[in-house]
Amino acid sequence: MKKTTLAIAVAIASLTSAAHAAQPENTFYAGGKVGWSSFHHAGLGDDFKKPDDQVGGGLFVGYQANPYMAIELGYDYLGNAKFKSKVEDKDDYKFAVHGASVTGKLSYPLAFITDDLDFYARAGAFIHHTKFKGNEYDKSNVSVSPVFGGGFDYKLTDNFTARVDYQWVNRIGNNGPKDFHPDNGLLSLGLIYNLGGPTTKVVAKPAELEVKENRFVLNEDVLFDYSKATLKPEGETALDALLKTLASINPTEGAIVVIGHTDRIGSAAYNQKLSERRAESVMHYLISKGVPSEVISARGAGKTQPVTGNKCNALRGNSLKACLGPDRRVEIEVKAKNVEQVVVDNQTSVR
């Protein structure tokens, strides 16, 4: 018993706050950017001046799979650059570039600065249309170049994120002079709207004392996204708070049981599997924080033990989903010698 209590207490002492990504996971987003576009290494030699910086920008959409990985599709306009000749009898060249890109994005939350800031890097392909005009040339071309980028995302609100981005397109193709394959750098500021961002705001009510001995009840909408079994950051926070109480309970051997419950939407087989995966997610998280694996187990009850009764029968769609919220829960049973009252974590989602 002392070993169990000590392990839990040590785990609590080592808890760190969960990292929150600037972009919510499992969401789609859309954004726009505008900035300064500059062309480099054009290959025209010393007979031409470096073109002035252009106004560039673009639009993009993305899918944030998890706090660290996303994929983005974008359209970029890199400007209409003018390469001015230093030689009087030579024509100036005009070069316009725009196109579409697909990039993979890797992010790293900078939680040591703030939970709302991410650093990221992007890499992929830029499919571009170019138009080269000057002297005997007046041609268009479509080709593909590698594109790289990096920058910072900063979460402004639940639905809006600001972005600072630097993008590099390498060796842009054309139908002009043979050696003309310029690179392009685009430094931009952007604003992102999280299309699939949080539509609910989690509000933590003060803890309430309930006569339900040795049992903690946590709303699954706090722990998980709907129909998912991956713990959300606020779910990890709720479990971190629970660990503090577990350390004072001093559970006996084999005494902690995690039970997953679902609502009645969907088949019995699907809900049974979902409840098991959710219970196992909670169990593995508690183990990762120091609860000895030999004193904890998990099982799923599916949709067999609802607590809402018949009050939701007349509802449909989102109204039914909201009404059935109490059925979507995780219960943690603790057998202990010194527990007379248990604080029930009564966090709820307010729509």
Image (cartoon, grey):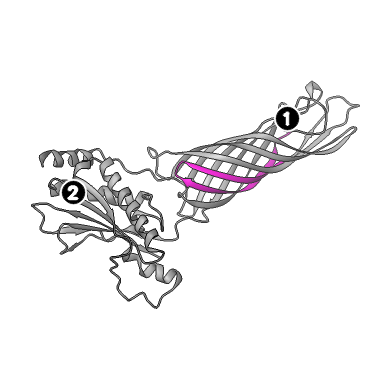
> Per the image, is 321 magenta?
no
Residue 273 is situated, as x and y percent measured from the top left of the image, at 36, 55
The residue most toward the left is: 337
How far across and down, in percent of the image, does residue 271 sit?
Answer: 37, 60
Q: Secondary structure at mark 1?
A: loop
Q: Residues within 10 Å of mark 2 (few under 14, many from 20)?
A: some
Q: Are marks 2 and 1 in contact (CB under 8 Å)?
A: no
* Label 2 or label 1, whichever comes before in sequence order: 1
x then y, percent, for residue 293: 22, 42
Which residue, given by chain and number where applicable, does mark 2 sit on?
246
Residue found at x 29% / y 52%: 238
Residue 248 at least partly seen: yes
125 sits left or right of 163 in the view: right
From what the image shows, is residue 181 above or below residue 207? above
| Left or right position of 311 against 249 | right
The quadrant of the picture occupied by the C terminus is bottom left
Name the image quarter holding residue 266.
Answer: bottom left
Residue underneath mark 1? 182
Farthest residue toward the front? 269
Q: Is residue 73 within the magenta segment?
A: yes
Q: Is residue 103 above or below residue 256?
A: above
Q: Which mark is residue 260?
A: none
* Residue 277 in picture, x, y percent from top left: 35, 51
Q: Which residues make up the magenta segment?
A: 51-78
* Quadrant hosting residue 300: bottom left
Residue kind at label 2, given as amino acid type: Leu
Please state which amino acid type lies under the numbered disc 1.
Pro
Q: Nearer the viewer, residue 76 or 280?
A: 280
Q: Is residue 288 placed above or below 27 in the rendered structure?
A: above
